Amino acid sequence: MPAFAWWELGHETVGAVALANVKPLTRTAIRALLAKQALLETPTCPARTIEQAAVWPDCVKRLGDRFSYMENWHYQDADVCKPFDLKASCKDGNCVSRQIERQVKLLKDKTLPARERVQALALLVHFVGDLHQPLHDAEYDGDAGGNLTRTDYGFVTAPKLNLHKIWDGYLAERSITTGPSLIRGYPAEERARREAGSVEDWSREAWDVARNTVYPTDLGPDYCNHEGERRRGSLSNTQIEALVPVVRDQVVNGGLRLARLLDEALG
């Protein structure tokens, strides 16, 4: 997987949406925990704010073996051409959905050392963001969540540009900066609708976005019936425009669902 899922802006926005929608007591608890971020002993990867905490799990990848055990926790590549099967893509709990559930439990446990709870907070904020990037939930023909599917992006035809990088960065940044800011308080009715369901439900939903939108837009509607050499995908400017609201919707879902989990753990 690439070093920066959703890149920085996507993760920061999910965290900021969550902070704008948690209960006041939860917000106070979040800030109190992040005030202890020095306990993480990662001065090159600070977590003083929820935005910094949101990218901390990617930042510490640069620290080598110290945090390498977390590498598989950022994704779960369920095959989009087969029925959804989370167990098959989440062996021994080493996947993003199970780690979200684990971090919530750790965050709730006030008997744990503060360092463990600060780390759990950063991991939870980040992993909920990862879960809502559809290519962290899916793969096609063993392409590692789109990393091996070379794709043109509008007029950009770089030889090594791949579908995952487009969704992590170029498309995410374009979508988040298009239209009104996503960082605001949302009405209770909308929050209730978006927050409903379990982590597994959210996993299946993101996988559906990959299966029904991400891959067919890039490779064509018959992509699962294709055999032979891996095809190069292509996203026209018209298709990119059509994907912007899809990405914005995923970011808002991630932020509001994260707010729900933080309220459950800290509120």
Image (cartoon, grey):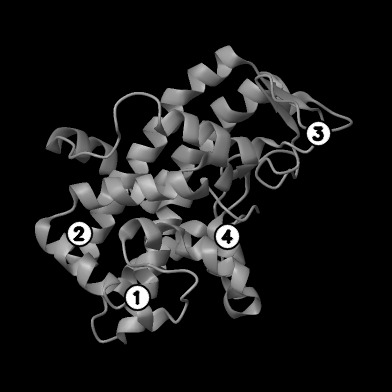
- Relative to the observer, which residue lies in front, 37 or 138? 37
Instruction: Answer with left or right where residue 176 lies relative to residue 260.
Output: right
- Disc 4 and disc 2: Cα gap in Å? 26 Å
- Amino acid type at circle 1 is Gln
Q: Mark 1 and mark 2 in contact (Cβ < 8 Å)?
A: no
Q: In terms of sequence position, does the residue under pointer 4 or pointer 1 come before the other?
A: 1
Could you say whether the residue bearing mark 4 is in a helix, strand or loop? Answer: loop
- Disc 3 and disc 2: Cα gap in Å? 44 Å
Mark number, residue 159:
3
- Disc 3 and disc 4: Cα gap in Å? 32 Å
Q: Residues within 10 Å of mark 3 (few under 14, many from 20)?
A: few
- Amino acid type at circle 4 is Cys
Instruction: Answer with left or right where residue 221 lies relative to residue 240.
Output: right
Q: Residues within 10 Å of mark 4 (few under 14, many from 20)?
A: some
- Disc 4 and disc 1: Cα gap in Å? 30 Å
Could you say whether the residue bearing mark 1 is in a helix, strand or loop? Answer: helix
- Residue 228, how many percent across, how many down? 89, 30
Residue to which mark 2 is pinned? 263
- Relative to the observer, which residue lies in front, 30 or 62? 62
Could you say whether the residue bearing mark 2 is in a helix, strand or loop? Answer: helix
Q: In terms of sequence position, does the residue under pointer 4 or pointer 2 come before the other?
A: 4
Q: Residues within 10 Å of mark 1 (few under 14, many from 20)?
A: many
Mark number, residue 90:
4
Q: Is residue 82 visible?
A: no
